[in-house]
Amino acid sequence: MADPRTALPRRLASSGAALLLGLLATTACSAEEAPPAPSEPTVTSLSDLDTGPLLPARRDPCADVPASVLDDLGAGEDDVERWQPGQALPDSAQVADEFGCKVSGDVTATAWVFAPPVSAREAQGLLEETPRPRCRPAPGPVFGSPGAAYACDLEGGTQVHGVRGLLADAWVTCEVAGGDAATADRWCAAVLESLSATQD
């Protein structure tokens, strides 16, 4: 932001300086009064979250995930990988077209939101595609319209539980590998809250 003093005429320098000091004081107070980042999620299940009015931002899905949620996954901030469009996906040469994050703890939790807008027709087509081999529709809370939950069996017996869906024109996916459906439900609720958090 440009220094407001540079726009003041010299003849108003004295009054302008006083005004500037007042603005700086107000800004300092506002900064001190700003609420801290959440330490606890306000919802712990997709079934408790009204996703109808949500307008997810296209940004890092883990940006506002509370530390307690990472704790539940057996992870900390240093265990979070992030990527954005144009960057290589983790452990892959494929270039991302989404904003995403991966938490590696006792389980592996991943979330991403497509950068391009997605129509309802395109979303329906995405739902008809299998997320990975050996996946099937699963019961449980979902989000989006359309949207669906899924479960997959990985080699070695690891299970993946996830949810994907369309919110406004944002295609969002969240999943947990090595955990159960309840863990994925809590993770997805935290991700949606993070993506919908008000940004300054």
Image: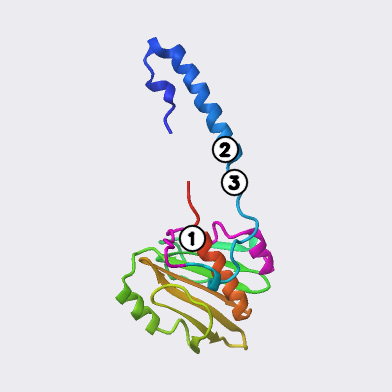
Judging by the rendered image, the residue that carries numbered circle 3 is: 35
Amino acid at dot 3: Pro
Marks 2,1: beta carbons within 8 A: no
Image quarter (top left, top right, bottom left or bottom right) of the N terminus: top left
| Amino acid beneath label 1 | Leu
Kind of residue indicated by mark 2? Ala
Identify the residue under disc 2: 31
- The residue depicted at 47 percent of the width and 83 percent of the height is 132
2 and 3 marks in contact (CB < 8 Å):
no
Q: CA distance from mark 2 to mark 3?
A: 9 Å
In the image, 125: left or right of 159? left
Highlighted magenta segment, given as a residue range = 51-75
Q: Nearer the viewer, residue 82 or 129?
A: 129
Q: Is residue 90 visible?
A: no
Element class at badge 3:
loop
Q: Earlier in the sequence, mark 2 or mark 1?
A: 2
Question: In this picture, is 152 found above or below 147?
Answer: below
Percent position (x, y) of residue 76? 67, 61
Nearer mark to the viewer, of 1 and 3: 3
Inspect the magenta stretch and tell me whether residue 71 lies in it: yes
- Whether residue 26 appears in this view of the structure is yes
The colour style of the image is rainbow
Near mark 1 (Cα within 10 A), the count class, few <14, some 14-19 or many ≥20, is many
Where is 6 relative to 73, above or below? above
Reading the image, the residue beneath label 1 is: 195
Residue 84 % position (x, y)? 45, 60
Measured Cα–Cα span from mark 2 to mark 1: 23 Å
Q: Magenta stretch mostly in which secondary structure?
A: loop
Q: Position of residue 143 (x, y in %)?
A: 46, 73
